[in-house]
Image: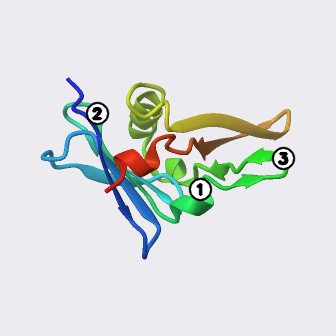
């Protein structure tokens, strides 16, 4: 059962943390320079996500949402990478992080992500 997420925003560092299971211990996985996923490997679920430089992550460009390469996936074993990708495609995180692929040619595919702004940020963030 997913609890109501707890949003914590630190204005000085522009960091948003969203805790789904605030009392659980977790392993941190750096997906990008700005996105850290904290997972419970045994329960196979996301415990918390930390978004560094949140305003940059959700900033729109003249072309649309900013995307960021999921460079941290390359540092994971195949099984860990699949576990993380599976978690990113499920609730509660799939509404916040949207995975896509950048394909510069027919032979290369790079996973990227964009962050959906929290619609009710002022109501949810403490």
Residue at horizontal 72%, vertical 52%? 60
State the separation of the CA atoms marked 2 and 1. Answer: 23 Å
State the separation of the CA atoms marked 2 and 3. Answer: 33 Å
Q: In which quarter of the image is residue 20?
A: top left
Residues at marks 2 and 3 touching, judged by CB atoms closer than 8 Å:
no
Residue at horizontal 25%, vertical 38%? 41
Q: Residue 45 carries which label?
A: 2
- Number of residues whose C-alpha sits closer than 10 Å to that of mark 3, classed few (under 14), some (14–19) or many (20 or more): few
State the separation of the CA atoms marked 1 and 3. Answer: 15 Å
Q: Along the horizontal axis of the image, is 112 left or right of 89?
A: right
- Number of residues whose C-alpha sits closer than 10 Å to that of mark 2, classed few (under 14), some (14–19) or many (20 or more): many
Give x and y (percent) for residue 12.
42, 76
Q: Along the horizontal axis of the image, is 84 left or right of 69?
A: left
**How is the rendered protein coloured?**
rainbow
Asked if 48 appears above or below 16 in the picture, the reply is: above
Q: Which residue corresponds to mark 1?
A: 57
Q: Which residue corresponds to mark 3?
A: 63
Q: Along the horizontal axis of the image, is 45 left or right of 64?
A: left
Give x and y (percent) for residue 14.
47, 68
Q: Which of marks 2 and 3 is nearer the N terminus?
A: 2
Q: In which quarter of the image is residue 11?
A: bottom left
Residue at horizontal 77%, vertical 44%? 64
Q: Which of marks 2 and 1 is nearer the N terminus?
A: 2
Give x and y (percent) for residue 77.
42, 43
Disc 3, SS:
loop
Foreground label between 2 and 3: 3
Classify the position of the N terminus by image quarter. Answer: top left
Q: Which of marks 1 and 3 is nearer the N terminus?
A: 1
Give x and y (percent) for residue 114.
62, 44
């Amino acid at each position: 059962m997913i609890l109501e997420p707890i949003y914590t925003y630190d204005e000085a560092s522009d960091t948003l943390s969203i805790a789904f299971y605030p009392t659980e211990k977790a392993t941190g996985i750096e997906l990008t320079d700005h996105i850290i996923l904290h997972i419970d490997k045994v329960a196979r679920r996301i415990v918390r996500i930390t978004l560094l430089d949140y305003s940059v992550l959700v900033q729109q460009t003249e072309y649309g949402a900013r995307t960021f390469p999921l460079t941290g996936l390359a540092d994971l074993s195949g099984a860990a990478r699949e576990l993380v990708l599976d978690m990113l495609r499920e609730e509660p995180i799939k509404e916040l992080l949207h995975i896509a692929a950048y394909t510069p040619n027919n032979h290369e595919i790079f996973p990227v992500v964009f962050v959906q702004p929290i619609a009710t940020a002022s109501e949810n963030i403490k």
